[in-house]
Structures are given as C-alpha cells and as structure tokens.
Image: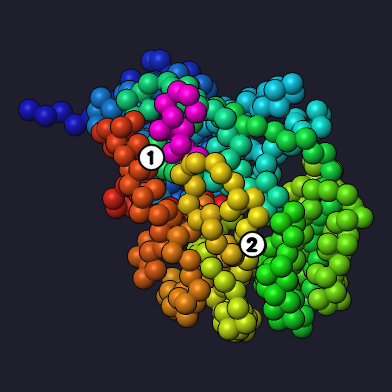
C-alpha cells in the first residue's frame, strides 16, 4: 500500500533541520513569502522555505529529491511570468550578506541581495559593479540571465564580471564554482539561467568608477516620432562608450502621478557615459538636438545614483511583457513600431528599445549568454490587467510584421511571455542550448529544479 506524503509531512520533516521558516499554505506568513514582484502571477507551492544559508537550501533539495518533489527558487520575483510548477519554493531573500574586498576589487554577494545593497557598499571604496538598470532587482537572477545594464556598451554583459559562485546542485551538494572548479557549471550559470542549481552566493569583479555622466531626456507626445527615428539613425554611428535606450510609455490619468505625466504618452531617452562630463555633454549633444526636451536630467551622477537613469518601478504591480532582439532598426521597422505603439486603442503601455553593440559584442568571455551580436534589444507589454487578454495575439501580430529584422537569437532575461506564441524566439543558439541542457543533466540528474512547465530543457524563460 502506497502512502501519499502531504505538505504537512514535508514541512515537519524539513522543520527538524532547516533553520529558516518552513510554511504551508495555511501559515500566516505564507502569502508574503511566495509573493512575486509581478502581481499578475500568483504562486501556490505546497511548501515555502525561507532559507538562511546554503545548508538550509541543501537540506530542502535533499528532502525534495528523496520524495520526488520539484523545487523552485525566488528572490524578488521580478522574473515571474507564469506560476511556478513545483511543490516547494525556496525563498533566498534572507541570504543578504554583502562583503567588498577593496584590494581584490571583488564583491561577495548573498543569493538574496538586490543591487541597491551592493552599489553603495562598493561606492565606499570608489568601486562599482556592472549593475542592472533597476537597483530593486535581485543580483543572482539578473546575472544568471546575463544582465544588460545602463553601462552595457561600455563594459559588456554584467555576467562577464562573475568570478565564482556557491551553488547547491540537484543532488543537494554545496559546490564552489569558478573557472577552475566545475568549469562547465561556471560557464552555464553566466547566462544559462534556469534549472542549473540554486546560487546561494555569487562573486563579481568590480571596476573603478565613482561618477557617470547620465540621465534621461523627456519628450512630449508630438515629438515621439521625431525622437525615435532620429535616435535609430544615431545608433548606427554611436560611440561604443555610450549606452542609450528609448522608452515610449503611456501613463494613466491618476493623481498619484506628477501632472506632466498624467494621462500622457511620452518618450524617455536614457543616456550613460562613464567618463568626463564635458566629453559626455559633447556626446549627448546630437540627442539633445533631436527635439526640445520637456525635461533634461542628463548630468553628472554619483555611482550610487545610477538607478536614476532608467527610474524603473520600485513597487510590485501587475505586468505582461514580451521581448525580441532586432538585427536592424531601419525606417520601415520604426514606422511599424510607431504605428503600433501610438495607436489610441493599443493594448500596450510601454515599448523599450536598448542599443546593443560595443563591449557586448567585443567581449571575449566564453559563457552561456545568448544574443550578443544584435543591434537592438526590444521589450514591450502592459501594466493594465484589463488588457492582458489582448496582448498575446497583438504581440504575435507585431512580431509577424517585424519578421525581416528579428534576430535569430535573443537573451533569456528579455524573452518575456513567449509560451504559446507563434514566435518562439530562441534564448540561445542551438549549440549553447544543447550545452546548457548537458550541464543541467549532469548537476540535476533527476530534473528536481523546476521553474514552470516550459517543455524540454533549454526552452525560453523570462526575467527583467
């Protein structure tokens, strides 16, 4: 006679040796423990565990493996696009240690740390990590997908600066991973993203940089077309030291917004140059000349103010996002984007275009990162749940029209909600996807780690 094990049984077994909280669905703190940053996604694992250290994570993995249960991991939930398809969710947010070795220029970062904790700690020593656009995003999830930040053209993918990690494997082993130890796993965690192991600490190389010339230009509705077309042409000869992106955003008419954004569609052109402010001003001049900006916030910034360039949301909310990479952005493609995103009845809230190239392409780092050699990283979607049902088919239609300029490969952090789409854009080349799957099989032979039901290993996923 087979006895079916219950969530209460697993929780009781874990509670014997796990130091962090072990919660079932009826526990008062359960909802907060499993909540994702994307409030459109509801997580309902049978058991949630708030790990305090790598040993807690290893214990959960060993118990789950013994009983044939699947395990998922979450820090902030910025990457949640679908509910997890696992019985146990490990929350790593309590792994919050940050240690800066100023002499070695290396940061040791706990698996639950956000960039907001790392940047000021490094700044005390005149150092900076190659961070993401949002200080609120978890470091590990961002780096495991590659990491396309506001200084990307100057310094490359953020994951290029990873020098080591502590990883709990699918067999419950705690592994110290680097170029010399488990090099196959080290290769994979820098861009391979999912189902490779649970990273409880990551080590990243820091650069000497304390100031940036950067910020954003805000343009009104009437100037969106002029700015988008002008910026697209400017990117063809842009200097490698400058990283830019363009956001076209439609804001609701809400009192909580400043009057200049309330009920309007605007364009925000972001700019970052890690050098002399006078040279930065010279390099920004062609962008300032595209149209008269309603606000000009490009200025010298301390490294601790790097997040002001993108000003990404800091509070959780519902979202639906999709992404694709473009090999070119000619006038015809720009016309399609303008027609799509400025239409009065469009279901979209935002379009973001990030200029690639520079160090992103020139880097000689051998890692699992997908989508290096492209021109534009595109992300789009909405934040109004009443229009979410309209977005998948609208996104499919848009990608159909952009087909001539779609790059054959994208990046796992930018794929968004791809499942069921008619454009299953690859997050990696066939060669890299096969290599990642091989690493997954070696370090998680039972397929214990599970994010959602994405089909075969090597499928696309999502994280911003």
Quadrant into which the N terminus falls: top left
Mark 1 or mark 2, which is nearer the start of the sequence? 1
Which residue does the image show at 53% across and 68% down from the upper left?
A: 327
Q: CA distance from mark 2 to mark 1?
A: 28 Å
The x and y percentages for residue 453 are 32, 50
> Would you identify the image quadrant in which residue 281 lies?
bottom right
Residue with the mark numbered 2:
354
Asked if residue 193 is positioned above or below residue 173 in the image, the reply reads below
Asked whether residue 40 is in view, the answer is no
User: Is residue 146 rendered to the left or right of residue 194?
Assistant: right
**The magenta stretch spans which residues?**
179-190
Asked if residue 236 is positioned above or below residue 330 in the image, the reply reads above
- Numbered disc 1: secondary structure: loop
Asked if residue 162 is positioned above or below residue 292 in the image, the reply reads above
User: Is residue 181 rendered to the left or right of residue 147?
Assistant: left
Residue with the mark numbered 1:
195
């Amino acid at each position: 006679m087979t006895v079916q094990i219950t969530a209460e049984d697993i929780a009781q077994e874990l509670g014997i040796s796990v130091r962090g909280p072990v919660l079932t669905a009826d526990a008062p703190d359960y909802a907060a423990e499993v909540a994702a940053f994307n409030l459109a996604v509801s997580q309902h694992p049978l058991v949630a565990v708030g790990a305090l250290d790598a040993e807690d994570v290893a214990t959960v993995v060993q118990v789950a493996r013994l009983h044939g249960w699947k395990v998922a991991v979450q820090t902030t939930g910025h990457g949640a696009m679908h509910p997890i398809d696992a019985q146990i969710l490990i929350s790593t947010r309590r792994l919050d240690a940050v240690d800066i070795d100023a002499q070695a220029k290396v940061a040791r970062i706990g698996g639950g740390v956000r960039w907001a904790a790392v940047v000021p700690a490094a700044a005390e020593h005149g150092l900076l990590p190659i961070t993401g656009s949002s200080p609120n995003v978890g470091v590990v999830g961002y780096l495991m997908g590659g990491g396309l930040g506001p200084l990307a053209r100057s310094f490359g993918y953020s994951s290029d600066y990873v020098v080591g990690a502590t990883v709990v494997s699918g067999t419950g082993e705690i592994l110290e991973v680097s170029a010399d130890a488990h090099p196959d796993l080290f290769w994979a965690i820098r861009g391979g993203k999912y189902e490779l192991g649970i990273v409880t600490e990551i080590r990243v190389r820091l650069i000497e940089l304390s100031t940036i010339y950067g910020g954003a230009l805000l343009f009104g509705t009437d100037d969106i077309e002029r700015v988008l077309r002008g910026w697209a042409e400017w990117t063809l000869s842009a200097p490698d030291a400058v990283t830019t992106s363009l956001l076209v955003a439609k804001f609701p008419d809400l009192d909580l917004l400043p009057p200049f954004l309330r009920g309007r569609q605007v364009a925000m052109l972001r700019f970052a140059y890690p050098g002399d402010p006078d040279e930065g001003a010279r390099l920004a001049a062609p962008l300032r000349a595209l149209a008269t900006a309603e606000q000009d916030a490009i200025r010298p910034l301390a490294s601790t103010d790097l997040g002001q360039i993108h000003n990404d949301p800091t509070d959780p909310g519902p979202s639906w996002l999709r992404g694709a990479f473009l090999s070119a952005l000619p006038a015809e493609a720009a016309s399609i984007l303008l027609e799509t995103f400025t239409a009065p009845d469009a279901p979209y809230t935002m379009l973001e275009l990030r200029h690639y190239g520079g160090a992103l392409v020139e880097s000689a780092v051998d890692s699992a990162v997908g989508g290096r050699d492209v021109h534009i990283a595109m992300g789009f979607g909405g934040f109004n749940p009443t229009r979410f049902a309209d977005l998948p088919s609208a996104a499919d239609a848009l990608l159909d029209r952009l087909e001539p300029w779609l790059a054959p490969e994208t990046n796992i952090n930018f794929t968004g909600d791809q499942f069921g789409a008619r454009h299953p854009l690859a997050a990696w080349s066939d060669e890299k996807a096969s290599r990642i799957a091989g690493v997954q099989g070696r370090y998680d032979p039972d397929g214990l780690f599970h994010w959602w039901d994405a089909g075969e290993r090597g499928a696309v996923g999502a994280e911003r």
